[in-house]
Amino acid sequence: MDIIDLHCDTISVLGEKNENLYSNSGHFDILRASEAGLILQFFALFTMPADRNSALRHTLRLAEKYLSQLDKYDDYLYPVKTAGDINNSTENHKIGCLLHLEGAECLGKDIAVLEILYRLGLRSIGLTWNHRNLLADGIGESNGGGISDKGKEMIQAMDQMGIILDLAHISEKAYFEALEHYNRPVIVSHANARQLCPHRRNLTDEQLRALARHGGIVGVNQVSDFVAVEKPSLDKFIDHIIYISELIGVEHVALGSDFDGADDIVLKGVQDYKNLPAKMRERGFSEDEIRKILSENAGRTIKSII
Ligand SMILES: [Zn+2]
């Protein structure tokens, strides 16, 4: 079954281990992803916020890693830059790759840098990781503020250019403000329901309802700490899918694994996505609902933005 996944950190990990995308020791590689039915994967570029002065250099190095892997394995991968590119995946039997920036420190407050990264293929941005930057506050700031004036300008530029706004990691105040400044559907690429697991990165019911009102989607996340305080499991991961579907509708649910973003996740890696449809059937999802959650909701949302 076709699968779209909204978040992985594999590019950063490849650089550290000197491994490649075709086959590696992490959670995600081409061999296992193709077998599992992946048609589109978001690839995050992540820089520690403390490295603000070197953030752009570090981001460009990661972008080079991403682009060179796409070149090297172009029999299996292709870049997704326009809405039309998404349909190609079924025809060319390749995995579409969408370039994402996790924490926008490297932009400073300079829209010209955004334009350059757009030319490199960047189509999705989370303004912050857990910390504060020039654009907005992250969820890790104890007195989390909202979005700065420059942040609002950046969001408007993203809106005009057709860059996806990802609200994972942002402070609660900034989350609600961002929804008012971006006219397209937003995504929360990797988070779960705080009602089931009280992690700060998970979304409150109020956040989930606001997301649905703005036509957005949340990528349900596999990181054990976000799934359950006690005994995280695949079943408890599906509990989040059920809870969010019942609260705001199945149309707003997608997948955002966080492969290679944490050591402890409830699947062993992308290969285990193969088993997800059967597990969801057992829990009462219809074929139509499974298709929506695994790929159609994400496909619809991405197409309406890029
Ligand atoms: Zn993250």
Image (tube, grey):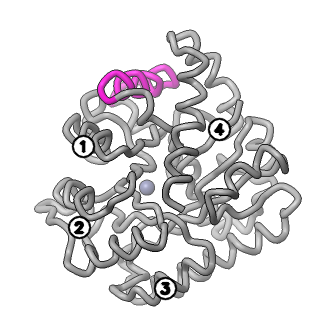
Q: Is residue 25 left or right of residue 222?
A: right
Residue 270's spot in the image, x, y percent? 67, 40
Spatial CA distance of label 1 from label 2 is 19 Å
- Looking at the picture, does residue 85 appear above or below residue 240? below
Q: Earlier in the sequence, mark 3 or mark 1?
A: 3
Q: Is residue 206 left or right of residue 133?
A: left
Q: Earlier in the sequence, mark 1 or mark 2?
A: 2
Was residue 155 drawn as part of the magenta stretch in this picture?
no
Tell me the quadrant of the picture where the C terminus can be found.
bottom right
User: What range of the chain is rendered magenta?
Assistant: 229-248
Crowd class of label 3 (few under 14; some 14 to 19; many from 20; radius 10 Å): some
Q: Earlier in the sequence, mark 3 or mark 4?
A: 4
Identified by mark 4, the residue type is Ile
Spatial CA distance of label 4 from label 2 is 32 Å
**Residue 52's image quarter?**
bottom left
Secondary structure category for the residue under label 1? helix
Identified by mark 1, the residue type is Ala
Q: Which residue is mark 3?
A: 56
Residue at (51, 44) in percent of width and height: 256
Crowd class of label 1 (few under 14; some 14 to 19; many from 20; radius 10 Å): some
Identified by mark 3, the residue type is Leu
**Residue 291's image quarter?**
top right
Identified by mark 2, the residue type is Asp
Q: Is residue 238 left or right of residue 119?
A: left
Label number found at residue 210: 1
- Looking at the picture, does residue 50 appear above or below residue 81? below
Label number found at residue 3: 4
Spatial CA distance of label 3 from label 4 is 31 Å
Q: CB under 8 Å between callouts 1 and 2?
A: no
Q: Nearer the viewer, mark 3 or mark 4?
A: 4
